[in-house]
Image (spheres, rainbow, N blue to C red):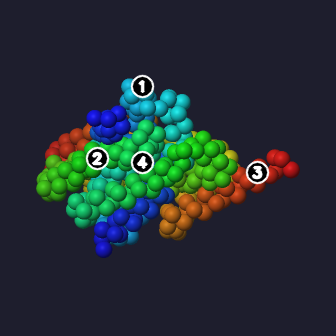
Amino acid sequence: MILWELFYSFFLIGAFTFGGGYAMFPLVREQALAHGWLDAAQLVDFVAVSESTPGPFAVNMATYVGAQTAGVPGALCATVGVVLPSFLIILLVARFLRAFRDNRIVRGCMSGLKPAAVGLIASAVLSVALTVFVPDAPALPSLTEPVFWVSAAVFAAAAALLFWKKPHPVAVLGISAALGVAAGYALGL
Amino acid sequence: MTDRGKDLVSLFLTFMKIGAFTFGGGYAMIPLIQKEAAGKRGWITEEELLGVVAVAESTPGPIAVNAATYIGERVAGFPGAFLATLGVILPSFVILLAVSYGLRAADGLRAVRYAFLGLKAGVLALMLRALWTMFCKVPKKAASSVLMAAAFLLTAFVRVPAVYVLLGCALAGLVWSLAAERRRKP
């Protein structure tokens, strides 16, 4: 039944994610943790992989979670699930595109959905921050632990780069991975 | 081959190229879709493409998938929509399957472990940057701020399922905007 669960969960994710990209992450996180498919740390790894490979983030995430959970059939079910809602809805609205966009009901719902998506992402970012900096929660990180300082340094470097210039996300991930490898060998973690 | 057959093949191949060569998805794909589907092939006009992007924002799902389905449908009906959508997701599907098996084989390698230590911190920075951009785009209105704060608090501390939060906020936005409309023209 895991295949059905994958399909159904990703169908829901596809149906409730507006705007794509990170907007789907809070929902993927919720479903994956609730079903016990992944733990919080693996999820962050998955985001890194999905961001550094080509293609839509949602499709990458679905294929990857599906493959890790139930092999090729799992990947297929999750990917079809995440794509199906947009496919069907666009087929329905393709003929009266402009009328749909200007519809007052659609506009009204969107005026609530946009801020809600930002709030959901903020809560997901908070949980990712906890996963990165407080991995053994509820135990606080020990400040003598080199892993904590490597994470803090890489985060500071990546954030500074991102807010200062607008580098490509793949470049930021490449630099972060290289810093992690360098620090890991240098400190013998 | 018939004209329709040619259209179907080129829809599939063009969208496969778009899927294979854009990183990050979403808005990153729009310039390439513009170049391939509007410029080179003339399947839709630039203006229509902007309309598609606007609609993609108000329909669920990845923008690339929405655009592929829409353009495919316009060019060649249902088979076109199907093949364009299949094309845009196929590269992701194959690449991520390969990465999934590759990383499982490499599990336990020290270099991979170190790389993911750095990647986790980098992803956090990327998400924070994306969050900031989205936050700046939210209209500075009381209604938006209340919904944003409510969505954050309900999911971060009360653990209300995200789907209910989204449904509630969509309804609140609808009621709010219809009420505002009524106030404007009494």
* Residue B136 x %, y %: 56, 41
Q: Nearer the viewer, residue B74 or B180?
A: B74
Marks 1 and 3 share the same chain: yes
Which chain's residue wears label 4? B
- Disc assigned to residue B90: 2
Q: Number of labelled discs? A: 4
Residue A32 vs residue A163: left or right?
left
- Disc assigned to residue B180: 3
- Disc assigned to residue B39: 1
Q: Amino acid at mark 4?
A: Phe
The answer, for residue A104, to whether it is visible in the render is yes
Q: How far separated are the C-alphas under marks 4 and 2?
A: 18 Å
* Residue A166 x %, y %: 41, 32
- Disc assigned to residue B78: 4
Q: How far separated are the C-alphas under marks 2 and 1?
A: 23 Å
Residue A106 in the image: above or below residue B75 = below
* Residue A150 x %, y %: 28, 48
First of labels 4, 2 by sequence position: 4
Which chain's residue wears label 1? B
First of labels 2, 1 by sequence position: 1
First of labels 3, 4 by sequence position: 4
Q: How far separated are the C-alphas under marks 1 and 3?
A: 41 Å
